[in-house]
Image (cartoon, coloured by chain):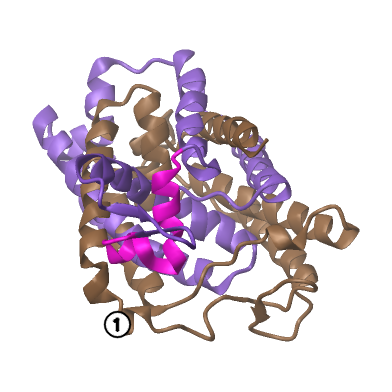
Chain colours: A purple, B brown
Amino acid sequence: MLMDWKIGGVALGVVFFLAVLLVKPIGVSTQFVILDGIIGDAINNELVVKTDEGYTSSNAYLAKSHGKYAKNVANPLNYSFIFVIAMAIGAVVSGVARRETIEERQVPSLWRKNFGDSVAKRYVGAFIGGFIVIFGARLAGGCTSGHMMSGMMQTSLSGYIFTLGVFAAAIPTAMIMYKRS
Amino acid sequence: MTIFLAIVIGAAFGFVLDRIGTTNPNWIFKMLNLTNLHLAKTILMAIGVGSVLMFVGQMAGFVDVGHMSVKTAYVGVGVGGLIMGFGWAFSGYCPGTSVAAAASGRKDALFFIAGGLLGAAAYMVSYASIKGTFLMDKIAGGKVTLGTIPGAKYEGLTAIQGDLLGIALGVVFIIVAFVLPNKLVGGDAHSDAVPAE
């Protein structure tokens, strides 16, 4: 069922290594910003504009670092964005062999044990969690992939600071919220 | 070529994330409430293996040091980590696993992603006012590694040779993965049973 941690750990480590060997370290959370930018630019095509030097935006975040994000919004067929779409394809392939029940796919069993069977409650919780996670990850400049895995693997100080922060908050939160297991 | 690599490496990443259980919030909750550390062992092993391979490759000369990408250390990294950690424990998903989980069929992950897109938008809007605050103050010079890596464009926090330190730390991560017990909390007989799926 679940992959043995030794095999799974080596497999995951090899994927992170191949990414650095062939292209660059793995990161995901930036792409939430890029997708927002693509949606925003579709609604208001003044959001991202081309300049002589590249791209810029009326939004300060998209415009930062010489319009690095603005450029990716304007060209969605870039490595990092396609990478995240490909992740979904890989997970579909892995998931077809193992189908959880519809109940589990809506409300994970441990959530259910602690907070009941309400599907709406879980969806609202997941939505709020998503908001908090991505806001925090963007403030930090990376997430579990970019800071924790890629960062600590490269011995970067930022990866260690991030990981300390994450577990300092996550462990007490989980111990309080998920008492029944 | 890079698009081809994005598809191959991305798909491999999504596949492995699902196989090792990270797309299942129950495993995240159990790791974080310390009742089942299987996933923590997997992550430690992965960081260790990735680090050893990369730094051995650099020393042997077949891994381009220029492919490294070290992020800046600033106050917001720690504060954002605290915020993300709370949300991670609360929901059971992080940015990467939510995408893979939704693809593997989990409906709640779609709501996480929708919330995430709103959270990203909220950050984009508030960035202009956050930018000038202490949250962006660099720590120890910002883009630094623990040792000084030969040929890298990053400063070292110490003068220790960075690639050797990277290999040593990688080995430490692997050892910790082995010695870490399967659980730190939960002494009752039932918790040894196969976890409910």
* Depicted A87 relative to depicted A53: above or below: above
What chain is tagged by disc 1? B
Q: To which quarter of the image does residue B13 belong?
A: top right
Point out the image quarter for the C terminus of chain A. top left
Q: Main secondary structure of the magenta part?
A: helix
* Depicted A25 relative to depicted B152: above or below: above
Disc 1 residue type (three-letter): Gly
Residue A87 appears in the picture as rendered: yes
**What residue does disc 1 label?**
B132
Rate crowding at label 1 as few (under 14), some (14 to 19) or many (20 or more) other CA atoms within 10 Å. few
Q: How many marks?
A: 1
Between residues B163 and A78, which one lies in front from this camera angle? A78
Q: Position of residue A99 (x, y in %)?
A: 39, 15
For the point 65% across and 45% down, which residue is it?
A19
Report helix, strand or loop for mark 1. Answer: loop
Q: Which residues make up the magenta segment?
A: A57-76
For the point 42% across and 59% down, which residue is it?
A51
For the point 25% across and 16% down, which residue is it?
A102
